[in-house]
Image (cartoon, coloured by chain):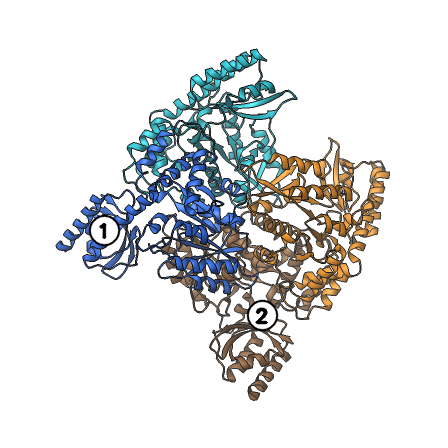
Chain colours: A brown, B orange, C blue, D cyan
Amino acid sequence: MYSFKSDYSEGAHPAILGALAATNLEQAEGYGEDDYSRQAAALIKRQVGNPRAAVHLFAGGTQTNLTALAAFLRPHEAVIAPATGHILVHETGAIEATGHKILSVEVSDGKINAAHIQAVFDAHTDEHMVKPKLVYISDPTEIGSIYTLAELRQMSLLCRAKNLYLYIDGARLGSALCSDENDLRLADLGELADAFYIGGTKNGALLGEALVICNDALKADFRFHMKQKGALLAKGKLLGIQFRELFQNGLYFELAAHANAMAGLLKKAISDAGFRFLTHSPTNQIFPILPNRLIERLQEKYSFYVWAKVDADHSAVRLVTSWATEEAAVAAFIKDLHTCIGAK
Amino acid sequence: MYSFKSDYSEGAHPAILGALAATNLEQAEGYGEDDYSRQAAALIKRQVGNPRAAVHLFAGGTQTNLTALAAFLRPHEAVIAPATGHILVHETGAIEATGHKILSVEVSDGKINAAHIQAVFDAHTDEHMVKPKLVYISDPTEIGSIYTLAELRQMSLLCRAKNLYLYIDGARLGSALCSDENDLRLADLGELADAFYIGGTKNGALLGEALVICNDALKADFRFHMKQKGALLAKGKLLGIQFRELFQNGLYFELAAHANAMAGLLKKAISDAGFRFLTHSPTNQIFPILPNRLIERLQEKYSFYVWAKVDADHSAVRLVTSWATEEAAVAAFIKDLHTCIGAK
Amino acid sequence: MYSFKSDYSEGAHPAILGALAATNLEQAEGYGEDDYSRQAAALIKRQVGNPRAAVHLFAGGTQTNLTALAAFLRPHEAVIAPATGHILVHETGAIEATGHKILSVEVSDGKINAAHIQAVFDAHTDEHMVKPKLVYISDPTEIGSIYTLAELRQMSLLCRAKNLYLYIDGARLGSALCSDENDLRLADLGELADAFYIGGTKNGALLGEALVICNDALKADFRFHMKQKGALLAKGKLLGIQFRELFQNGLYFELAAHANAMAGLLKKAISDAGFRFLTHSPTNQIFPILPNRLIERLQEKYSFYVWAKVDADHSAVRLVTSWATEEAAVAAFIKDLHTCIGAK
Amino acid sequence: MYSFKSDYSEGAHPAILGALAATNLEQAEGYGEDDYSRQAAALIKRQVGNPRAAVHLFAGGTQTNLTALAAFLRPHEAVIAPATGHILVHETGAIEATGHKILSVEVSDGKINAAHIQAVFDAHTDEHMVKPKLVYISDPTEIGSIYTLAELRQMSLLCRAKNLYLYIDGARLGSALCSDENDLRLADLGELADAFYIGGTKNGALLGEALVICNDALKADFRFHMKQKGALLAKGKLLGIQFRELFQNGLYFELAAHANAMAGLLKKAISDAGFRFLTHSPTNQIFPILPNRLIERLQEKYSFYVWAKVDADHSAVRLVTSWATEEAAVAAFIKDLHTCIGAK
């Protein structure tokens, strides 16, 4: 049984495990004040093109989101997010648990835009309602779509005009940045976002997310917030070593490009076989619509999520690839797909 | 410069790194629902002697404490803890950030007892005050002392009589359990505590703490609380593999015994040299009182915390050993101590 | 300028002021433990038909909602509410500030039903999402509609089957209970809801809401929650005296009936003049759709909210009546309406 | 049975009830945006000598404290308070429920000073601990003592030097300001504190506390915080009318002076009879130490709290007077005291 369920099924890229082994018995300062964490931060700031950015390393995405948003917002301030946003649906109310409402925007493609933001902003007129203060997006979105530079720029402009923060959840940011359709660079995020995070867990690290705070006003005392939320790892070098490895020679982008290439192979084969997709995804998650009978046959050899019922006989499934996806496994899946179709 | 600052300066025990490498490319279920996490839980439950216990794996101690206490308590319920307790002083208000007051008990040796608990309980008489509901202790304490079975039993009896929970922070539990003066076994904790955690980070793991919930009433929906606090790691097997390695062949206890032995060598040498100690510590942290001149000389070659000023010319320092402390380093320190004394 | 903006523009019904004056210099126990508060609770329990109910008196509706919901829910549990619900829109995130997500249900008439609840319940499948636990409705709704006994019974049945609590915000409960179209009695709420509150502020009291907790499991330690939220008034008798006055001789229902009658006069006159309404409201808030020109003319002599734009030339306005609305003012408004129409 | 238990046993001063009755049927804007609330704020700002101060009216003291402190502090920031502070002991963890730790300072007379503040400040050195940010005191303290201008000035200077806020709980502020030993004026508080509140409930109002925010940095969006905590009363004029009445002709100070005078009579008589006091209190609460036999005799005709056991045969009791305390009742108490002593 080969799994296309997620991009966190395997451990770490071997180069990362190697770096952990090579540095294992060195003594280091705790809680992220070691040299490796500093080096990782320096590498990331260089790529982001902002030497004044603050970089903080976390163990996971929900932890990053909840720590950052709780630190950035005052009690009456709220978040604007697409209805499919990870913080809105799949983090067990982690943001609300820190006291903040999330205002949901209905969208069809996972993406919100400046008009959505304006509408929510305009609808909140007095102290009987929360005050919208931070726009949360993810790139890529939960359904694999990505933002263009123009879209991001427009949102950023509006946010600054309205005194809103723009925050980008980059759990799979590598896949967005390495997509064929992408025109964003890390430096654009550094310029247009107030804060964003670069996901490591889903792109080759054992665990780890790098939060980049671009807005000076959001930097003060940030490590207090991390400690309070249980997010300062005693052996913080564990994260520093991994991000140094990912960013010192471009490994981060190589791994994401591989994941995208594997998804591309699957997408082309499925499309060539005549199937449509639930969403347009140029990243490492694709959502083909398949006959239920075919899905059942494929599930005998492959695991993946059935995402949504489309009609009585068809469902959309989610196939996810990663840095660890073997090209041979993709080829086998395609072959089995054809066999199953032929046998239908 | 050799460090006796902490027991989290190095990475993981080599056997743990080896296990991570050996299983690295296996595909596993995410979020702690993998086989390794299940095996680790089974091993721990066996040692705790309670097959009905719930075991949950966390990335760090503060995260464990805040998730557990927030899950166990209703809004108006408070924690009783010694004034030196980690949650009271060194977790940046993490428990209060989840809404709960901690009632502090002044103690001289880091330990609270049944009489302290009774006094706090009796002082809270009506709805204008919080309702004490959970007793937090750590074993060993922040200053290296340990609880006896009799002390723990007495507290547990009182807690059950008063409908209070007893929770034990075991960040360094291995060191307590392997102390020459200890008469507690894991099975005693399983019987007497409502919940406790077994620290991995400070005893050989890259990261990881295993929370054991013994009281049935505290088990429901616990994974919801973990996710909400950002404590469910996507690659949860990372924790499962480590705790399986620590508990399948007694490695956990071997490592703690080594740490204690190294602390014992330091303690004996320092004592033989005529120095006293701030506290009686039979575990891997010791607090000798040394002349300030001597401390300065030692700091040229060793790093450690100066813990407290004792008088104009003397201070207590903290020396911490771990599974990774080299006997040669301990011998060198002792030799340097004698040299410094001679040169005084 | 006469105001139809709200049902809290005036002070208290004269009988209530009289009762306050008559008892003013009596010494009483503080914090709601006085005889008047006990008598008020007894009167309410009798009407609710549940001698075991717990009755607690609050100063305002938002305070009642946030105290009750925070007391009833564990951290990962969420509220289901109609998208127009007061707690969702007009309480500045008060519920989220206590840590709980509100799951919004789109509705056209302000009312949710058993099918809505079932759908939300079914969509929340695992620990990555919040756990729906409490259904919040208001009767009448924010737009003046009311629930029937059959609707409430169906929701209550589903809630009990799914282990959900049913909570009713009764800020204007008197108006619902006294509506011509109502078939609910207080005793039905006592049987079908887990908790609900009877609004006093909007029905003749200076201030005050009476929370009735019907479900035994929700009663424990409730006064601790009140004190923690700042909801125990030192001079609690102030609330007890008012609710005693409202419920000892049926004053509560008389006042609500008057408010409804005044709204009925307005509704009939506006309808007879050929205008439609945004919603069907049989209570003390009505939402006629009027030409913008007419609205402007009326605003010269009356204050009221323009609720929603309907088309380029028409808007819906909100007219609210209360126990204090003078029949002469209603007659004057109707006369002015006709005059304005004639002059159009 | 006459009660000396509290200063909130009776209702409101008749002039206040009269003002409520006189304005009862006037229509007013809701939620504190009425003319009376504006007039009350203007009167208070004039007395405070700070036209830029923001004044907000609340229903009770715990509500005022929790709303203000939650609004003023970021999540990792903590409060410094005397161990006897009301927020620390008698508000059911209300401040912690908003996420903030309170750092307790042991004091003998209820008062903290600049040296205490400095010590707490110095002990909090890094992000593993909370960041002290606000100093909470009450004047008078819980045990009746008051601050001098010099003490307050010294604390204020230190707070500004360390970037801490100084907040004064004035639940009984009238009694402090009208004490024979007082040298503080309202204008001093306006200059030296960042925020403070003027208690109405315990000095003649039905209910009401007036928060005065002096520090510009703390004013933004304050009404959002009030609404979120359930502290915006729909009929806000109820508070405005009362504070206008208290401050337009000096009634506030007259009432407090009466309370103090009544306490003074009791104090003198008890002292003349040869008894000592637990604390030095120049305000409306006194704590005489009496033989237990005498206490029991007095309790047959008077209710009051037994505050603390002093030795086997003696206890300290608390006697509280108020604007409503009748001189005849005081005289009767004194006479009964003498009778009881004679009969001993």
Comparing marks 2 and 1, which lies closer to the viewer?
1
Q: Quadrant of residue C41?
A: top left
How many other residues sit within 10 Å of disc 1, few (<14), some (14-19) or many (≥20)? Answer: some
> D289 or D67: nearer the eye?
D289
Residue B84 location in percent, x, y? Answer: 68, 40
* Residue B140 appears anywhere in the view: yes
Task: Check chain identity for marks 2 and 1: say if they share one.
Answer: no
Residue A20 location in percent, x, y? Answer: 70, 62
Chain for numbered disc 2:
A
Q: Quadrant of residue D290?
A: top right
Task: Give the residue type that dot 2 points to.
Answer: Ala
> B48 or D31: nearer the eye?
B48
Q: Look at the numbered disc 2 and give the secondary structure of its residue.
A: helix
Residue B35 shown left or right of residue C161 in the figure: right
* Residue D224 appears anywhere in the view: no
Task: Give the residue type that dot 1 points to.
Answer: Leu
Q: Label 2 vs label 1: CA separation?
A: 69 Å
Chain for numbered disc 1:
C
Residue B132 shown left or right of residue B200 in the figure: left
Q: Which residue is mark 2?
A: A256
